[in-house]
Image (spheres, rainbow, N blue to C red):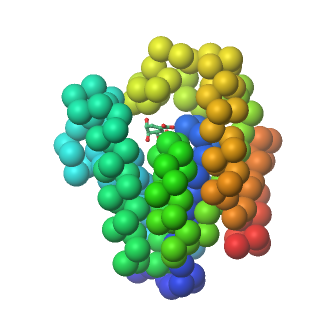
Amino acid sequence: QSRNLFNYNIFLIGFMGAGKSTISDYLKNALAMDVVEMDQCIVERQGMSISDIFETYGEEYFRELETNLLIEMQSQSNVVVSCGGGVPMRERNVTEMKKNGRVVLLTAKPQTILDRVKDNHDRPLLENNKNVDFIGDLMEKRRPKYEAAADIIIETDGKTELEICEELIHRL
Ligand code: S3P
């Protein structure tokens, strides 16, 4: 049974490994909120891993699936949406999120990101690029769009999950 705390959705954005899934999971357990994990939802619906979708249909196809999922979220509220890292790069996605949501950007240093993603093999953009320089460069390229999309920015380095969630709730 989920509780109706917010009459809008909370969209967690940020780089791969910034902690979107971890924090949405925490909110799900602590506040009994519904969570939509975008990557996971797409994987379930397509019956394929993210890597296989990229390989078989290409990145643009995956990006369309993301946009369609965000459009679906229009009819819901009080949901924590853990977005894929590339979501804020499309203007259309940002427009869709802003219609009924607060956008929360989670940030972390490249080294922190690397530590968190190094053992995962379903992130095609990082698969052959698991190093601080690549991550730092891509992060800098994305930063302007991430920051422009965000209503709230939370730095996660050195903070516990509880601290991050408290800060988030406090600032909503
Ligand atoms: C991507 C991030 C991934 C996933 C896909 C592309 C990106 O999600 O959507 O591999 O472009 O940053 P996570 O941020 O959950 O890893």
> What quarter of the picture does the C terminus occupy?
bottom right
Near-viewer residue (140 or 30): 140
Q: Position of residue 34 (x, y in %)?
A: 44, 70
Q: Position of residue 130 (x, y in %)?
A: 56, 18
Q: Is 129 located above or below residue 30 in the figure?
A: above
Q: Is 108 located above or below residue 31 in the figure?
A: above
Q: Residue furthest right?
A: 158
Q: Residue furthest front?
A: 91
Q: How many marks?
A: 0
> What quarter of the picture does the N terminus occupy?
bottom left
Near-viewer residue (166 or 30): 166
Location of residue 131 (image quadrant): top right
Left or right: 61 with respect to 33? left
Q: Position of residue 169 (x, y in %)?
A: 70, 70
Residue at point 49%, 49% (across, down): 90
Q: Is residue 166 something one can see in this rendering? A: no
Residue at point 76%, 63% (across, down): 167
Left or right: 12 with respect to 66? right
Residue at point 29%, 31% (across, down): 58
Q: Is 93 located above or below residue 134 in the figure?
A: below
Left or right: 51 with respect to 132? left
Residue at point 55%, 37% (across, down): 16
Q: Is residue 136 something one can see in this rendering? A: yes
Q: Position of residue 70 (x, y in %)?
A: 40, 62
Left or right: 134 with respect to 57? right
